[in-house]
Amino acid sequence: MDFTKKINNYSNLLKNTLDALDRKEINNFLDVVLKAYSNSKSIYIFGNGGSASTASHIACDYNKGISYGFDKRFKAVSLADNIATITAYANDVSYNDIYAEQLRNFLTPGDIVIGISGSGNSKNIIKAISYANSQGNITIGMTGYNGGELKKISKYSINTNINDMELSEDMHLILCHMTKKIIIEYLNNQKYGQQSSVF
């Protein structure tokens, strides 16, 4: 069987979606994250399914990939990683509360809250972002499709603007690696006072 046409179709859609990403949205994301880092604030990240794994990946890249070797480090927490806490809230309260209730434990003024949802309409993500907004925190929505409710209520947004869940999740992971590389180059330039290009 020859799937070359299917492979090419997916590859072309991926490239076109990447090219269409709003550069201003990405730049705003970088500014907000670097401000949190500069002020020693925490970054809380969460999602469902594939987006939960992306939240874990972002936290890993920021906590190790951008922090190792620096005296000042990022403080990124994936709220998708504590399965005991998640299932306790899901079972005893509501699945819609699994992230908002965790934020009530940790969130302090100036912390950044990032919700990831392909559809932009995941109820537990909306509830957590709404809570963070009510506390005056800066919120970021990473979405696909038209952004849904999450794009509307987040103070900042990165929307892939593609009606495809897999491509949206691909874009979110690419954004994780893109911002990681840009940030570490920026920090190296600050540390060594010279260009240290990583790509």
Image: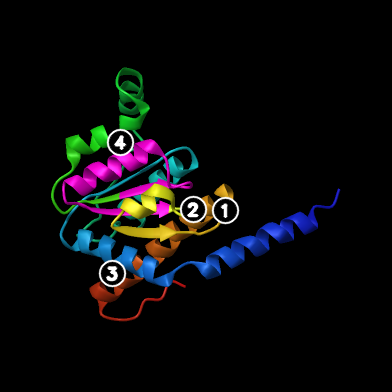
Residue located beneath label 4 in the image = 99
Vertical comparison of 101 with 53: above or below: above
Element under disc 2? loop
Circles 2 and 1: CB distance less than 8 Å?
Answer: yes
Circles 3 and 4: CB distance less than 8 Å?
Answer: no
Residue 172: percent from left, percent from top: 47, 54
Which circle's residue, 3 or 4, is located before the other in the chain?
Answer: 4
- Seen at 16% across and 54% down, the residue is 110
Vertical comparison of 69 with 189: above or below: above
Q: Is residue 61 visible?
A: no
Does residue 98 appear to the left or right of 148 in the view shown? left
Q: Residue furthest bottom?
A: 194
Vertical comparison of 23 with 83: above or below: below
Is residue 61 magenta-colored?
Answer: no
Q: Identify which residue, 161 or 30, lies in the foreground.
A: 161
Circles 4 and 1: CB distance less than 8 Å?
Answer: no
Comparing marks 4 and 1, which lies closer to the viewer?
1
Residue located beneath label 1 in the image = 163
Q: The magenta stretch spans which residues? A: 114-142
Residue 197: percent from left, percent from top: 41, 76
What residue type is disc 4 on? Tyr
What residue type is disc 2 on? Gly
Residue located beneath label 3 in the image = 187
Label 4: how many residues lie within 10 Å, few (<14), some (14-19) or many (20+)?
many
